Image (cartoon, helix red, strand yellow):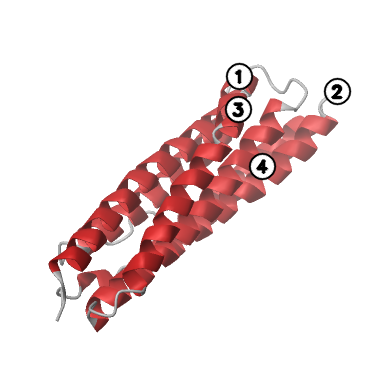
Amino acid sequence: MVTVHSVIELEHLERALDESGEFVLRLVKASARAFADGDPVLAQVVAALEPDVWADQQRIAVAVARVRGDRSVSDAELRRAVTVDRVNQELQAIAEQAVTVGRLIARAPAGPRATIAELDELGLAVGASLNGALGAVSAGRDGAAMPLEVTELLIDEAVRDATAAVMARSIEPGRREWGLRAMVALRCLRRIGRHALRVAAQTGPLTEPRG
């Protein structure tokens, strides 16, 4: 029999995952904005948030371990806990990539003075992908999974455009180091998009009725 305690524990765990997802989404958007605008101050703020991200992920991991260790938890609830754990791990990986972007931009020499539109578009695409993935996870717990609106193909196209824009500006005098850092940051944003798709793929067990 499933105990009331275990059900409440899992509900708290899912709410904590929602809050963590919202925090990571804000982090991703801020890192993408710092990249597009070449804003070292905002980039430093993003990089400084790494301890907070780690603490959130650890709290969720500990709570998952408690639920998985409860022998009264049904198979359906156990699968939900495992899914929360997997999403939590993906969010951790996303946050790490966002923090890396922050560090790269915070330490980079001055880049182009104006916002690079292609980088802005990539940031919007990646942010929308993660937002859609988190929406799918949240909707899945209500029994109606929301399809991911931003596809991998769209992100790939945004990455190609952003790469071309960075390469074009990297050949300008004094921009070589900036260009190298920007290329690494592009790869980080692409990885965020891939992790977001993996988050969306975890919604299956969340649509099951509670056991």
Are discs 3 and 4 less than 8 Å apart at CB? no
Q: Which residue is mark 2?
A: 174
Circles 1, 3 touching at the beta carbon (< 8 Å): yes
Disc 2 element: loop
Q: Residues within 10 Å of mark 1 (few under 14, many from 20)?
A: few
Question: Does the rendering let one see residue 156?
Answer: yes
Residue 180, horizontal then vertical, whole percent: 79, 39
Q: Is residue 171 left or right of residue 166?
A: right
Helix, strand or loop status at disc 4: helix
Please provide percent x and percent y for residue 157. 54, 52
> How much space separates mark 2 and mark 4, taking CA atoms?
19 Å
Mark 3 vs mark 4: in front: 3
Foreground residue among 36 and 203? 203
Query: Dividing the picture into quarters, in which one does residue 42 lie?
Result: top right
Distance from disc 2 to disc 3, alpha carbons, whole Å, reads 21 Å
Whole-angstrom CA distance, mark 1 to mark 4, is: 16 Å
In the image, what residue type sits under mark 4?
Ala
> Quadrant of the image for the C terminus?
bottom left
Q: Earlier in the sequence, mark 3 or mark 4?
A: 3
The residues tagged by marks 3 and 4 sit, at their Cα atoms, a distance apart of: 12 Å
Residues under numbered marks 1 and 2 in contact, where contact means CB atoms less than 8 Å apart? no
- Residue corresponding to mark 1: 41
Question: Callout 4: 10 Å neighbours few (<14), some, many (20+)?
Answer: many
Point 83% across, 32% down: residue: 177
- Please tell me which of labels 1 and 4 falls first in the chain: 1
Query: Where is mark 4, residue-wise?
Result: 185
Residue hosting label 3: 43
In the rendered image, residue 195, in percent from the top left (x then y), is placed at 50, 59
Sequence-wise, the earlier of marks 1 and 2 is 1
Query: Label 2 amino acid?
Result: Gly
**Callout 3: SS:** helix
